[in-house]
Amino acid sequence: MGQSATVTPDDELIDRIVDVATAHGDVTEVIRTRAFAGSDDANLLIRHVQRRGGKGAYLMVGAGSPGPHHSENFDIAEESIPTAIEILESLIHG
């Protein structure tokens, strides 16, 4: 019926994300994966960056929601937001 943009995340960036997340004191589990069915808009953004020589990947922190994204059961783990910000900051400055 329709199509969705796919993306292949960059291994180098995934490695950096895993290293930074593993080193963070509040992170209890890191799952490294290459396949992720992310949202179409994020996939398009990552592909745009990659076509211009940049790196792209997904990062999910506190992703244990009782429901999928965009559903009435989705519930973000608000206590994980500071951890996510610290990880992103480390990736940017690292």
Image (cartoon, rainbow, N blue to C red):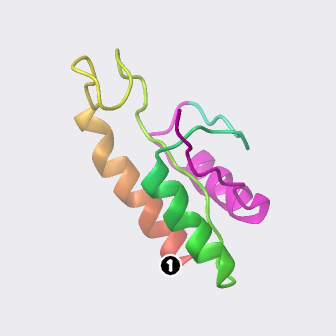
Residue type at numbered disc 1: His
Dot 1: few (<14), some (14–19), or many (≥20) neighbours within 10 Å? few
Residue at horizontal 37 percent and vertical 48 percent from the top = 83
Query: Residue 51 location, x and y as percent?
Result: 67, 78
Does the stretch in magenta take in 90? no
Q: Nearer the viewer, residue 80 or 44?
A: 44
Towards the viewer: 61 or 53: 53
Q: Name the residue under label 1.
A: 93
Q: Is residue 10 magenta?
A: yes
Residue 61: which quarter of the image?
top left
- How far from the left and from the top, in percent, is residue 15? 73, 57
Residue 77 vs 18, above or below: the answer is above
Percent across and percent down for residue 16 are 68, 61
Residue 85 rendering spot, x and y as whole percentages: 35, 58
| Secondary structure under the numbered disc 1 in the rendered image | helix
59 displayed left or right of 10: left
| 14 left or right, relative to 92 | right
Task: Work out whether residue 11 or residue 8 is closer to the camera in this orientation and state it.
Answer: 8
Image quarter of the C terminus: bottom right
Q: Residue furthest right?
A: 11
Q: Is residue 43 left or right of residue 74?
A: right
Position of 9 relative to 64 (above/below): below
Residue at figure coordinates x 23%, y 36% from the top left: 78
Left or right of residue 38, residue 63 in this image: left
Q: What stretch is highlighted in magenta?
A: 1-28
- Identify the residue at horizontal 73%, vertical 62% (top origin): 10
